[in-house]
Image (tube, grey):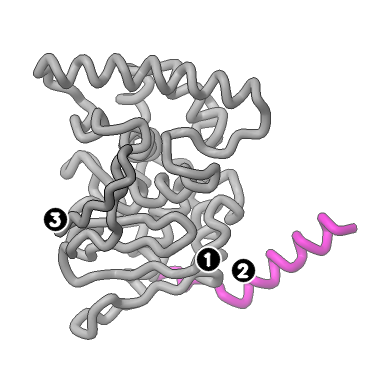
Amino acid sequence: MLKYLRRKAREKTLSKNALPDALWESTCGCLPFLAHWTSDMRTALRAQSTLFLVEKNIFSGHESLIVTPEMRTLIAAQACTLILHRTLDDYAGWTNIVVHPDSFPRTQDEIDDAGIVHHDAELVAGEAWEDGPVLLSWPDVWASRDFDHSGMNLVIHEFAHKIDMRAGEANGVPALKSRALHDAWCSALQAAFEDFRKRVDLGEETEIDPYASEHESEFFAVCAEIYVAAPEILKKNYPEFFKEMNAFFLIWESE
């Protein structure tokens, strides 16, 4: 009965807050990698994006920027690629997404191993806070929507960090259902990360952004971008880690 009631409540929310066809079609047209997705996948993405927009507040971080329905939907669609076959529980515990008109100074201080607080004033395109908002630079959201052209996807990257943080401090390991799944993930992650870091240190040209060598959390976030938008790259370079990611995100059912 409870499952039935939840399903009916979901159907009611989707009906009441349905995205206009023209808006959704325009959004999909702005994300070239969706052209490789099946119609069923895009339908599921539309539903998740609708529910996401009901739950999250997307607003401007500066008075000069007006966040339009097109902007909101484009952000939602990319964020929801990672939860295509999962639930909004992956994004629970926070509500706000702040859109900046340009790159912005890093807002969070960093604490080193000695406990010393460092304030880094460098400009960033995005930031994800543990138990807090996601901050995005709109020009970078727009520029990175075409993965084949930019080699990155800012929205997917920052929302991958949020999924990572659901299990605690960001370390590239999301909340997994069992110790066996956790151990398998960690083994695949560490093997892939250590190999990639060595390749970057040797100056090798890689299909994966060298930024992924900075930390396991960044490796996970960069690989999440690739897993969604260009899965063949991850499968070719790190098939075992691709397998673990696919078991978690469940996007590529045929793999």
The majority secondary structure of the magenta stretch comes to helix
Q: Quadrant of residue 211?
A: top left
Q: Earlier in the sequence, mark 2 or mark 3?
A: 2
Where, quadrant-wise, is the N terminus in this rendering?
Answer: bottom right
| Secondary element at tag 1 | helix
| Secondary element at tag 2 | helix
Q: Earlier in the sequence, mark 3 or mark 1?
A: 1
Q: Earlier in the sequence, mark 1 or mark 2?
A: 2
- Was residue 6 drawn as part of the magenta stretch in this picture? yes
* Most distant residue in the left direction: 203
For this rendering, which residue is in front, 16 or 111?
111
Tell me: residue 254, above or below residue 51. above
What residue would you read off at disc 1?
A: 50
Q: Give the number of the disc on residue 108.
A: none
Q: Magenta span covers which residues?
A: 1-22
Amino acid type for the residue under numbered disc 1: Thr
Q: Residue 129's x, y, as percent?
A: 39, 57
- Evaluate if marks 2 and 3 touch, with contact meaning CB atoms under 8 Å apart: no
Tell me: residue 220, above or below residue 131. above
Q: Residue 50's x, y, as percent?
A: 53, 66
Horizontal relation, residue 106 to residue 253: left or right: left
What residue would you read off at disc 3?
A: 122
Q: Residue 175's x, y, as percent?
A: 57, 39
Amino acid type for the residue under numbered disc 3: Glu
The alpha-carbon separation of the residues under discs 1 and 2 comes to: 7 Å
What residue would you read off at disc 2?
A: 14
| Secondary element at tag 3 | loop
Amino acid type for the residue under numbered disc 2: Leu
Q: Residue at x 32, y 63 (%)?
A: 135
